[in-house]
Image (tube, rainbow, N blue to C red):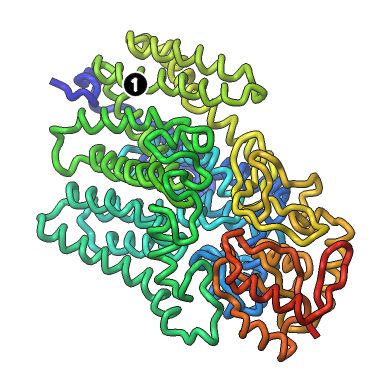
């Protein structure tokens, strides 16, 4: 009796005529394009086409978004001007304070900008290239367990996920995080194949550097990787446990060396660790960027189940109006495929590749998805990009396995259910915006009903209909998310909280005002309403506080650009500081850091900077960072001291104090 996920007994001859060889020519070029003959000759060209198409999608008109997130762009600029700023991820080249994340993503971006020069393109291009690499690695990983066709489907699924298009065309750290985690998955699969502790250690190294990208978010995949290796590696249980212990050591070492470096480095000769309360990277990892994200507090918004910017916490969060259009297009089908695949392979051998792959990617999806769903601290919809590789892989692996077993009714029924639920859910997602391609949802629902019905009744038995059926199925799975993905790539995005789809949202949310006379920044310190664009048609980097070239921003920029002090100015908003740095090319102190609660600089430190002539101007009205600081904060104390001791002047509508 055949398994549910296998086809009928072979009736054709075991020996077939070999495929025609590709045309003769340069042998190296031929091998590069068509492979070495160990797979159909069309596979390699298809994979190359996937990568080229992904590169076009991610790089086309990339600079329309200017500098994207000016907070991180300013840190890249600072790193190109000062080596210590590069090492620590400083927001300014004077090394007053770091960004509120570890600097691994900045290390890559700064290296790129140092080689090719600092510009909008060199700020955004590294993320686009990371996206292409992520798609290629996912293809290679899924191919090893489920074949090249499944690999191509997985790669295309990741490439065309709306939130992936968004983040691979933007300069948040998430692009590097996804690349490192997919690389870790690839190494884990290689390790399982031959019970290799070296490959498993490399997976640990990748996750460790993921920690240096977005801290504990990188660890969400570890349970899945550990379970997959423990259940499927081809060696004894004792050795499997020993290999896992070695991988844990690799994670700790690859993540811990930098934490140790920062902790032992004299605090007086390095920047303040932004986002921490004790000037400690370890405290930042455990507090603001760790447990604070899960449970709220520690400077995080949305405590008590509000979830910051991602809607109410709960099992349906990934399907709500904030997350749904970003990531959930194929999520219901992926969950169905995961459950069915695990059930159908429950009696397979321990080392079965299909079940191992389902455990790896399913564990990734479930653990990460549950954490994102129930986080009570700050959570942004774009975090869901970490789910995109797992969803794409599960669709490819389960879909191909079910198609291979289509001669069995249970497999056909599950595959039909995946098609139908995708069509229905895509219809719901598209219906949420009545102005966006109103006809598309009807096309998808019709194709979905026809495709699901045809699969369920076994139309594939008629060969001519099989091609039509496959085409309809691919369209159902891909039309909605592809439309959203292409639209996302065609829209400029700025600020700190971009969203995918037909609108540019650089959502505000953490308050703090801007200098008087200036335009709102459209970021977390800015206050742009959700869904409102802060982009201009020029595609330049003059965004937000700089007012798109208004007289106040032009005069202020000119004033700062003429300074020769260590810091041109100080202002009570990190976003304002970042935008001033980008426009003037000078270092600016961000008092209070991102959240406005960082004790940097203290009043005494600021007084010493002024006394020694290291800072020229104080710009009033910048708000208190994220708007969370109280009257006893360093930002408030500095503002009061400046107002009491220096005379205000107006520069194009902005209140400025000359500190000399």
Q: Position of residue 51 (x, y in %)?
A: 53, 44
The residue positioned farthest toward the bottom in the image shown: 612
Q: Secondary structure at mark 1?
A: helix
Residue 199 visible in the snapshot: yes
Q: Is 156 or 543 nearer to us in this picture?
A: 543
Question: Splitting the image into 4 quarters, where does residue 69 fall?
Answer: bottom right
Q: Is 430 or 10 nearer to us in this picture?
A: 430
Q: Quadrant of the N terminus?
A: top left
Q: Position of residue 5 (x, y in %)?
A: 24, 26
Q: Is residue 144 left or right of residue 569?
A: left
Question: Splitting the image into 4 quarters, where does residue 283 fall?
Answer: bottom left
Q: Which residue is mark 1?
A: 415
Q: Quadrant of the C terminus?
A: bottom right
Please report the residue visible at 38 percent of the width from the left and 44 percent of the height from the top.
374
Q: Is residue 135 left or right of residue 594?
A: left
Query: Measured along the vertical axis of the image, is residue 461 above or below residue 305?
Result: above
Q: Residues within 10 Å of mark 1 (few under 14, many from 20)?
A: many
Query: Measured along the vertical axis of the image, is residue 212 above or below residue 35?
Result: below
Query: Measured along the vertical axis of the image, is residue 281 above or below residue 358?
Result: below
Residue 89 visible in the snapshot: no
Q: Is residue 368 left or right of residue 446?
A: left
Q: Is 393 or 557 nearer to us in this picture?
A: 557
Q: Position of residue 249 (x, y in %)?
A: 27, 69
Q: Is 111 or 8 nearer to us in this picture?
A: 111
Please report the residue visible at 22 percent of the width from the left and 49 percent of the height from the top.
227
């Amino acid at each position: 009796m055949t398994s549910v996920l296998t086809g009928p007994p072979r009736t054709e001859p075991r020996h077939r005529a070999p495929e025609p060889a590709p045309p003769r020519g340069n042998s190296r070029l031929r091998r590069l394009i068509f492979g070495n003959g160990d797979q159909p000759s069309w596979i390699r060209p298809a994979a190359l086409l996937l990568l080229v198409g992904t590169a076009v999608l991610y790089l086309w008109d990339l600079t329309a978004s200017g500098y994207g997130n000016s907070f991180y762009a300013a840190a890249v600029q600072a790193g190109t001007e000062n080596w210590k700023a590069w090492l620590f991820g400083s927001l300014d080249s004077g090394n007053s304070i770091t960004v509120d994340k570890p600097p691994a993503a900045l290390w890559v971006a700064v290296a790129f900008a140092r080689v090719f020069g600092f510009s909008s393109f060199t700020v955004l291009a590294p993320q686009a290239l990371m996206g292409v690499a992520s798609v290629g690695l996912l293809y290679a990983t899924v191919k090893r367990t489920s074949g090249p066709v499944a690999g191509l489907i997985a790669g295309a699924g990741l490439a065309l996920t709306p939130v992936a298009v968004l983040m691979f065309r933007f300069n948040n750290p998430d692009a590097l995080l996804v690349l490192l985690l997919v690389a870790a998955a690839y190494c884990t699969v290689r390790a399982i194949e031959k019970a290799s502790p070296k490959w498993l250690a490399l997976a640990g190294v990748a996750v460790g550097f993921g920690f240096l990208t977005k801290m504990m978010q990188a660890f969400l995949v570890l349970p899945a990787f550990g379970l997959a290796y423990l259940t499927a590696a081809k060696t004894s249980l004792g050795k499997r446990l020993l290999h896992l212990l070695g991988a844990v050591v690799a994670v700790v070492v690859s993540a811990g060396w930098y934490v140790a470096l920062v902790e032992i480095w004299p605090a007086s000769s390095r920047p303040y660790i932004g986002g921490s309360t004790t000037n400690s990277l370890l405290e930042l990892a455990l507090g603001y960027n760790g447990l604070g994200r899960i449970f709220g507090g520690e400077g995080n918004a949305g405590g008590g189940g509000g979830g910051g910017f991602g809607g109410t916490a709960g099992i349906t969060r990934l399907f709500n109006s904030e997350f749904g259009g970003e990531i959930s297009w194929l999520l219901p089908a992926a969950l169905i495929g995961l459950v069915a695949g695990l059930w159908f392979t429950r009696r397979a051998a321990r080392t079965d590749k299909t079940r191992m792959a389902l455990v790896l990617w399913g564990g990734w999806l479930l653990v990460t998805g549950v954490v994102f769903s129930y986080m009570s601290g700050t959570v942004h919809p774009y975090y869901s990009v970490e789910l995109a590789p797992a969803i794409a892989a599960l669709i490819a692996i389960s879909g191909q396995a079910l198609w291979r077993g289509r001669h069995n009714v249970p497999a056909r029924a599950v595959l039909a259910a995946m098609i139908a639920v995708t069509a229905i859910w895509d219809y719901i997602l598209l219906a949420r915006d009545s102005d966006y391609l109103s006809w598309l949802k009807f096309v998808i629902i019709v194709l979905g009903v026809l495709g699901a019905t045809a699969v369920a009744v076994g139309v594939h038995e008629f060969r001519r209909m099989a091609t039509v059926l496959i085409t309809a199925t691919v369209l159902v799975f891909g039309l909605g998310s592809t439309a959203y993905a292409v639209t996302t790539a065609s829209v400029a995005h700025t600020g700190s909280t971009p969203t995918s789809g037909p609108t540019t949202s650089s959502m505000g949310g953490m308050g703090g005002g801007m200098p008087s006379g200036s335009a709102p920044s459209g970021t977390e310190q800015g206050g742009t309403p959700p869904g409102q664009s802060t982009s201009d048609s020029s595609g330049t980097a003059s965004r937000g506080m700089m007012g798109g070239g208004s007289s106040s921003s032009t005069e202020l920029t000119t004033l700062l650009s003429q300074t020769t002090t260590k810091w041109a100015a100080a202002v009570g908003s990190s976003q304002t500081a970042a935008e001033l740095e980008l426009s003037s090319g000078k270092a600016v102190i961000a008092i209070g850091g991102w959240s406005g609660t960082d004790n940097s600089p203290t009043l005494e430190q600021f007084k010493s900077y002024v006394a020694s002539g290291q800072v020229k101007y104080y710009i009033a009205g910048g708000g208190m960072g994220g708007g969370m600081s109280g009257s006893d904060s360093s930002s408030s104390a500095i503002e009061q001291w400046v107002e009491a001791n220096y005379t205000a002047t107006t520069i194009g509508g902005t209140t400025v104090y000359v500190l000399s």
